[in-house]
Amino acid sequence: MNLGLGRQAVIVTGAASGIGAAIARLLAAEGVGGLVVTDRDGAGLAKIGAELSPLVPVEAVEADLGDSAAPAAIATAATARFGRIDGLVNAAGLTTRGSFETATPAIWDALFAVNARAGFFLMQAVIADMRARGAGGAIVNILSMNAHCGIPELAVYSASKGAMVTLTKNAAHAHMADRIRV
């Protein structure tokens, strides 16, 4: 498969493992022009960076998306290394359990910080870069079927993913004229 990504600079969150790592590997195999991989797992991030850097230029940014400064730091690292951002994959996410009986404000805050707030502010930074350059691009948010209901133990997780569903639709509608696919 040739996705035509040879000149594109793409950010992938949650890239140290799971879906994020699989997407980073696919992008590297497709010959993306620049790949920014980010995760809070420094050891896992170093491993994926070392694996992919022989294939494509890689910038590894260790960041905890629970930190409100992380999205700006990631976007800044991407533009500093590659001069632009053409794509974003929001794959990072927490799945901490929290039901109507067991959830705490700390669980709520942690899940919404990573699963909704970080994704929003990464999209904001990427959209700003694309619009400033008059360039289109693509944003992919990894969602969950739990956004539609979810099992009882995933009430807070489901709500955070539901928030991302709404933000994804809003960004797609708000920026379609900018040629930004979300």
Image (cartoon, rainbow, N blue to C red):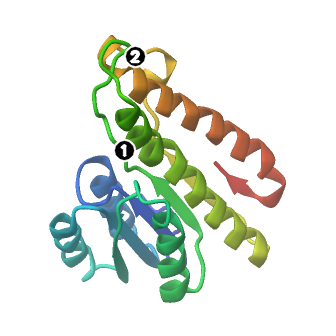
Q: What amino acid is labelled 2 in the image?
A: Gly
Q: Position of residue 65 (x, y in %)?
A: 41, 57
Q: In terms of secondary structure, where does tag 1 sit?
A: loop
The structure residue drawn at horizontal position 46% and vertical position 63%, both measured from the top left corner, is 2
The structure residue drawn at horizontal position 33% and vertical position 41%, both measured from the top left corner, is 94
Residue closer to the observer: 1 or 135: 135
**Which picture quadrant has residue 49?**
bottom left
32 vs 97: above or below? below
Q: In terms of secondary structure, where does tag 2 sit?
A: loop
The structure residue drawn at horizontal position 48% and vertical position 74%, both measured from the top left corner, is 73
Q: Which residue is identified by label 2?
A: 150
Count residues near mark 2 (Cα–Cα under 10 Å), then give few for <14, some for 14-19, many for 20+.
some
The structure residue drawn at horizontal position 77% and vertical position 52%, both measured from the top left corner, is 175
Q: Which residue is identified by label 1?
A: 93
Would residue 149 be seen by someone viewing this image from the given angle? yes
**Which picture quadrant has residue 93?**
top left
Which one is earlier in the sequence, the residue at label 1 or at label 2?
Answer: 1
50 vs 114: above or below? below
